[in-house]
Image: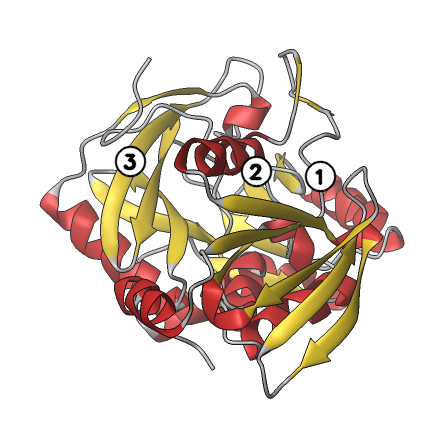
Amino acid sequence: MQVSNFKDFITEAKKGSDKPIQIAVVTKTHPNIKKRKVGGKEDKELTVELINDCCEELNIKCIVIETRNAIITGKDEEKNTLTVFNYDGKDTEHTFIGKDTICVTRAGAVEDEAGLSIISAFQNSGSFMINTRNAMLTCNNKLTSALLFEKFAIPTPRTAFVSNEKNIDDALKLIGNKFPVVMKTLTGTQGIGVVKVDSYESLVSTIQAMWKLGAELLIQEYMGVNFDVRTFVVDNKIFASTKRTHSSYDFRSNTHRGAEAEPYKLSEEEIELVLKTARLSRAYMCGVDHIVYKNKPYVLEINGSPGSGADYEGYQYK
């Protein structure tokens, strides 16, 4: 079962049960495990930590399920319950009632079968999903997203999948046959797996090296801009937007790579494009990334697990 409207879910949950709503965050990185930001201090996984903090303020129970150290120990399809043994420092079991649970899925959870099975179990129990398994897989795969953009005429840099050395030349022709080009792994967040390549020789050698590591790759037309825009869309409504200006040492505009972020006000054309793109993903909440090149907006990708560490027009300021 998938409830499409959050307000309806909350209303039905209140009517159907005396139990309070609880939050399950399915992630590959537990908030107590520290990660180092490039050019910055060591910090926790910010968005999961913010969800935890918010739940504490609202007196809502929040359980973080780290997929590498969690197993499903029980399911009752008649009662729509799910029990998870979770390594959270206490090695405890948690039982979730689907209709009383909001499941927040983070990107790392879809990287392996363990995470996907936990997401599916929550979805099958009737939990409200932010986001569903299919929506996360669509957002997490850059080739799937690129094909979706092409099918529905979403303006985006020209993109081609590179499957073997024989089709490198054909792929280059498809994206304009000019350097530099952008090479991307099909999955990856925070700018990891994104490389700007300046020559044919470098492209071939980089592709060969990445293939040796088992990566699947696409190449993309390079559009020279010094910033991109990340927009949060929640339930088909624009929630907040930020402009991310590249750092002096990196062409990528992710804040994890040292980009500077500031609140950004979207134009009417940008609003229309962002909302159309978000609807295609079928995600309840997503981040839509776009650039403005020669006065025209182009979508780069959709993120089903957007970070929240930037300054946004709408809710968070320095």
Residue under the image location 28 percent in, 66 percent down: 11
- Neighbor class of circle 1 (other Cα within 10 Å; few <14, some 14-19, many 20+) is many
Q: CA distance from mark 2 to mark 1?
A: 8 Å
Mark 2 lies on residue: 48
Please count the marks in the image: 3
Circle on res. 120: none
Q: Nearer the viewer, residue 138 or 283?
A: 283
In front of the other: 2 or 155: 2
Q: Quadrant of the C terminus?
A: top left
Point 83% across, 51% down: residue: 69
Examine the rendering and report whether any part of residue 188 can be seen: no
Lateral position of residue 1 relative to residue 249, left or right = left
Residue 67 in the figure: left or right of residue 137: right
Kindly identify the residue that appears in the image at 26 percent across and 59 percent down.
236
Element on which disc 3 rests: strand
Mark 2: give few (<14), some (14-19) or many (20+) Cα within 10 Å: many
* Secondary structure state at the residue bearing disc 1: loop
Three-letter code, disc 1:
His
Task: Report the Cα–Cα distance between label 2 and label 3.
Answer: 20 Å
Mark 3 or mark 1, earlier in chain: 1
